[in-house]
Amino acid sequence: MLFQRKRYKKLQEENRLLKQEISHLRATSTQGIINEQFPEANSADISCSPATLFKTLLNALPHSIYFKDLRSRIFLCNESMAKKHSQFNSEQEMIGKTDFDLFTQEHAEQAYRDEQKIIKTQKPLLNIIERETWANKQDTWVSTNKFPLHNEWNELIGTFGISVDITELKNTQADLEKAHRTLEEKVNERTKELTENQKKHQLITDNSFDIIMQIDPEGRFIYASPKIKTIMGYTPEELIGEPIIDYVDSEHKQELAQKFKDLLNGSTSKLNIISARTKSGEKVWLDISISPVLIDQKPDSFVCIARDITDTIDANNQLNLLKRAVENSPVSIIITNTNGVIEYVNSKFIELTGYSEDEAIGKTPAIQKSGKMDDKIYSELWETVSKGEEWRGELLNRKKNGDLYWELASISAVKNQQGDTTHFIAVKEDITQEKNRIEERKAEEARLKSIISMMLLNFDDENTLLKHVLEEAIRLTNSKIGFIYHYQEENQTFILNSWSKEVMQQCSIIEPRTTYELSKTGIWGEVVRQRKAIMVNDMKAFNPQRKGYPPGHAELTRFLSIPVFEKDKIVATVGVANKKEEYTTFDELQLELLMNSVWILVSRIRINNELKNKNIDLLELNNQRDKLFSIVSHDLRSPFMALINLSQIINENYDTLSEKEIKEYLGLITDGSEKTFNLLENLLEWSKSKRGLINYNPTDINLTEVCNHIINNMNAQFKVKNIEVTAELTKPVFLYADKDMVNSIFRNLLSNAVKFSMPDGKIKITAKNKGKMVEVCVEDNGVGMNIDTANNLFTSESITSQAGSNGEKGSGLGLVLCKEFVEYHKGDIWVKSAVGKGSKFHFTLPSFAST
């Protein structure tokens, strides 16, 4: 009966909502319907057209909706209507049908009359209760609203209607009427019985310590005992007819409603703890027991007994709050009995030490002892807390995994109401990081003092500085030994800079190596291969990267090495070893910071040394410049004065001079001009060489052709002394060299040979292959030279004017140029000579085959 009443109410609510939908549809334009049937009329450029939205709305409604033209033919309907007429597969198949195709003749005629009346009057027909008669199933009932349908120009184009199936409502109404009559009879029978029982129960409920309530199936108060006034502040009369969940806190409303629903479905009584609000707004906690009152084995109402447990809940909440505070405390907490046996540890203790709760409880705090604290500290601790006093201090403890850590501990006694000690509680804060920071600050100060001292010492030698740095690195990391190697990335080679003194004392290798190839190094080479620090705290443990070390090598127990970078390039490695404790990342950081600072000093020393070398080069250039000025002022001035004087003689005595005399003077002018030109050319080439302006462009050269060309060009110079010049090159010889430089080398060597040859002398040019080089020799049978002259012949000091066999003057520049041009080609030049026996000038140049 209760279910039927609920179903009836639900149908009534659906009917009310339907009326709202009808009112909304009546107020809505029909443009969407027309857009659905005539999509070409819809030109709005929107992401979801009104027609689509309207169709979605139609199909979402559970009621039958249809649109008909002026002849009552369907031109649009929703899915609900199509499903109702199951003989059609979809709403599309409904298009063009009339009620005569759907219902019996009787119902179709009535529907047609109604629609024609709407078309004629243009007024809607509302809330029509129709009985639909079917040819192949039972009759159904609908509540229908029909309306005239206009287009966007307000022209009447048909009708539309909405039908709500109320068949179940009709059947329910009939069942309710019958049930109502039955209920009235039963109520009359039970009223008398309940009146008698009520008097008996009233006395009990009025004097109960708990609140006793009767709640109807809808969850409303039927009765409340006077105790509710004491606990909740409401009189029973204020609550009658009110929903009980209105007085329950929001977090329990759904739970209580579900409980009533479960009991209605036949579940057993259950205990619930809920919170509610008193009339004054205070929160109370109630322990509620709910039982159904059964009539004919069906719940008719509920009896609720509620006990105020606010004080108990508050006490538990306070206890839980304290427990959560202890559990979530950022410090570790241990509680022991008076014998020091652990009875409780919080989660921070578990997290910090690595011991589980089961591993700690039943043990004593001695499981944390590191063995590095003085026993007097523990004796003082126990003596203090045994007297009921607090002990505070720092303890170095050990975790389960063996790691050491520092704690600031506060340990005190826990006493009962009688003042007797029942437990001890230790509150301990992990201060390891703070202690490490203090140590790091000390180490940083030491490192800074070390760097400052090195800067103040003002090292001007890189090796001396790095030896001092190595000792500082060993001291800062508390190591015993160490090394510094330079590293060349180009050929992957380590070059020893220095071992510490202790290493040399421990090492018994007779001839220790100073260079190592990266590929042949073991674990200490990983610092380069991995381009990062390498730390090994147990050198005896197996490591696949180790290759061992030779007998007599200093023994290693622990090892730390870092790379030193200069512009992303490894330039050195620093290693320390045999620290008493394990190396840490802080040691690694100390080394890196130290070497980063030191390498700035190294770079400064290198720059200073480079500046010194530059200064030496500058002085050399100044000396050469002075020599150049000397040559220009002396060696060039004299030839020019001679040319001027000869020109003046010809010019002033031209008419009196014979043709033979004029030719003689002109020959002298020509010879002087050529020598002056050669001197100028050498000066220019030497000047370019010293300023780095020489262009080096090697090409393939036929040496035979070069020799013949130079000999032909210098033929006039050879004839002056009647010197015979031969190039004894039996086979073609090819060079890969700069042609201009090769010409200058040959021109200067041949000029030098002519200068120091006697009249009717001989000059010979030979060449032979020497692997990748060609060795050329220019030999004369002239005056020769002593050993001292030969040794200084190609230096800048040789740039002096020396007279030839006929008193010819020279600058000495030619041979210096020859040396520089040969060295451009990575070749060598040398001379073999003896006084009175002539000279042999040898030089080497790259052969064409070597390229």
Image: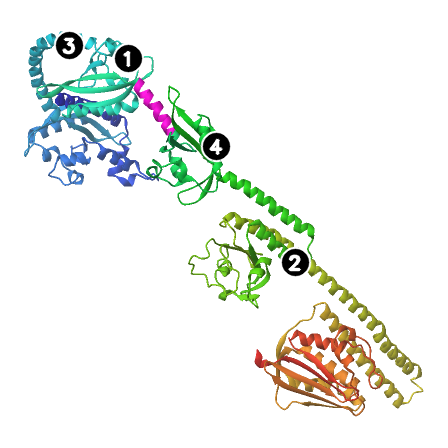
Q: Position of residue 430 (x, y in %)?
A: 46, 37
Q: Is residue 522 left or right of residue 183?
A: right
How far is the residue under mark 4 from the one under mark 3?
71 Å
Relative to 355, residue 234 above or below: above
Which disc, if any, is residue 464?
Answer: 2
Residue 312 painted magenta: yes
Q: Amino acid at mark 3?
A: His
Distance CA(mark 2)–CA(mark 1) = 92 Å
Q: Nearer the viewer, mark 3 or mark 2?
A: 2
The residue at 67%/75% (across/down) is 823
Q: Is residue 90 left or right of residue 378?
A: left
Q: In the image, what residue type sits under mark 2? A: Thr
**Which amino acid, by three-letter code, is at mark 4?**
Glu
The CA distance from mark 3 to mark 2 is 109 Å
Of all residues, the one furthest to the bottom in this rendering is 760
Question: Of the residues under marks 2 and 1, which one precedes in the sequence?
Answer: 1
Question: Which disc is residue 231 wearing?
Answer: 1
User: Residue 611: x and y, percent?
Assistant: 71, 59
Identify the residue at image location x=58%, y=52%. 473
Whichever of labels 3 and 2 marks the residue nearer the N terminus, that label is: 3
> Of discs 4 and 1, which sits in the foreground?
4
Residue placed at 30% from the left, 22% from the top?
250
User: Which three-letter amino acid code belongs to the residue tagged 1?
Assistant: Ile
* Magenta portion: prevailing SS class: helix
Q: Which residues are magenta?
A: 311-325
- What is the CA distance from the residue labelled 3 to the residue labelled 1? 21 Å
Q: Which residue is mark 3?
A: 201
Q: Which residue is mark 4?
A: 380
